[in-house]
Image (cartoon, grey):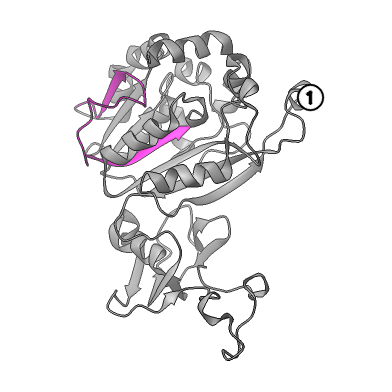
């Protein structure tokens, strides 16, 4: 498939975004706190021609190699360039050359604005489904802002992300998902795809796709109801859409369910935007200074990824305790006392 031609067709349908200026200047307050003041260093044309809402940049990027997929005119690319610092590196990949040329136009000016002696940004004309120019295991963080559901081949997209990420690397992105599969006739409609609706994955299909690509424990950090016009809702009746920020970690320490090894973590409270808690996912916040029992997937995040810098970990993998929630298949017989149905499990203060 000619991915470049596909994305150019999508771009032609989308046209200019009349809300770009307000949204990319953070009128809705969705840009992370540490990135917000850095907006002033990004050229106005870049901000005024950028297409996406919010800013999908995780914390702890200093010194990292970051890959920004479908970077458009480069607003998030240049924000990331400031967050990684002169010792880090950012590669922006964009299939629509007209958008990429805006980012290229200001490269030297942006580096001077940041006070860098050498450019830490590379801008590449390419598509997420073919990252052959990126070596295996060479990237710390991959980001994507509202473009994953545009992909015509999401399996290949995720496979490429997995390949280029280093051990402990993170795919951190925001996109629209839905609560059921979209009918094929609508899913193939390019105009609906350009609206970021027809390409939205059923959330359980996304989970299965993640697992198939060895991202065994997708975590959903933040969710918002995706607003639809009356016309859009009429075209897609009864389908609920949500915009979700998702974290996938590449590590062999993860499992497809939450297994217990008796490990604990304590968040140090050292992230500037999160002095009181660490947001692991939409249901789990680790309070600063509090020791919490966690499953192996959470301890794996701490052991394998850059987030280990902000946690203390106790324990190891020498003792396996089993399913964090208790194995109700094994313990369903009447002889096992004190076992309740999984749906009746009490809310736990730790991770799972």
Indicate the position of residue 265 as horizontal and vertical percent values.
Answer: 40, 71
Q: Viewer-proximal residue, 145 or 154?
A: 154
Give the answer, above or below, for where 343 lies relative to 223. Answer: below
Residue bounds of the magenta highlight: 118-145
Q: Which residue is mark 1?
A: 234
Q: Quadrant of residue 34?
A: top left
Res. 15 in view: no
Which SS class for mark 1?
Answer: helix
Task: Tell me which residue sits at (27%, 39%) in the image.
Answer: 163
Task: Tell me which residue sits at (22%, 42%) in the image.
Answer: 137
Task: Tell me which residue sits at (79%, 24%) in the image.
Answer: 234
Q: Quadrant of residue 117?
A: top left
Q: Residues within 10 Å of mark 1 (few under 14, many from 20)?
A: few
Q: Is residue 104 magenta?
A: no
| Horizontal side, residue 335 vs residue 210: left or right | right
Give the answer, above or below, for where 2 lies relative to 213. Answer: above
Quarter of the figure that contains the N terminus: top left
């Amino acid at each position: 498939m000619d991915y470049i031609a596909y994305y150019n067709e999508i771009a032609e349908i989308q046209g200019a975004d009349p809300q770009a200026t307000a949204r990319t200047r953070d009128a809705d307050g969705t840009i992370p706190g540490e990135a917000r003041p850095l907006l002033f260093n990004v050229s106005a044309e870049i901000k005024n021609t950028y297409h996406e809402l919010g800013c999908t940049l995780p914390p702890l990027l200093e010194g990292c190699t970051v890959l920004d997929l479908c970077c458009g005119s480069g607003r998030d690319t240049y924000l990331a360039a400031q967050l990684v610092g002169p010792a880090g590196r950012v590669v922006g990949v964009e299939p629509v050359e007209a958008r990429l040329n805006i980012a290229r136009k200001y490269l030297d000016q942006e580096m001077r604005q940041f006070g860098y002696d050498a450019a830490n940004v590379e801008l590449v004309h390419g598509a997420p489904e073919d990252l052959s120019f990126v070596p295996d295991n060479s990237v710390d963080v991959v980001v994507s802002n509202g473009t994953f559901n545009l992909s015509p081949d999401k399996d290949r997209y995720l496979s490429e992300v997995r390949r280029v990420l280093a051990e402990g690397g993170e795919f951190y992105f925001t996109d629209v998902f839905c609560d059921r599969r979209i009918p094929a006739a609508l899913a193939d409609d390019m105009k609906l795809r350009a609206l970021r609706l027809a390409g939205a994955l059923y959330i359980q299909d996304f989970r299965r796709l993640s697992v198939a690509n060895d991202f065994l424990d997708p975590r959903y950090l933040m969710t918002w109801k995706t607003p639809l016009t009356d016309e859009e809702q009429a075209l897609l009746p009864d389908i609920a859409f949500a915009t979700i920020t998702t974290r996938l970690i590449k590590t062999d320490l993860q499992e497809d369910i939450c297994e217990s090894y008796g490990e604990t973590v304590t968040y140090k409270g050292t992230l500037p935007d999160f002095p009181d808690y660490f947001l692991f996912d939409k249901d789990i916040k680790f309070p600063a200074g509090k020791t919490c029992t966690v499953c192996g997937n959470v301890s794996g995040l701490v052991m394998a990824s850059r987030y280990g810098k902000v946690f203390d970990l106790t324990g190891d993998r020498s003792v396996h305790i089993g399913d964090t929630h208790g194995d109700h298949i094994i313990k369903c017989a009447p002889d096992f006392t004190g076992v309740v149905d999984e749906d009746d499990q009490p809310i736990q203060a730790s991770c799972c």
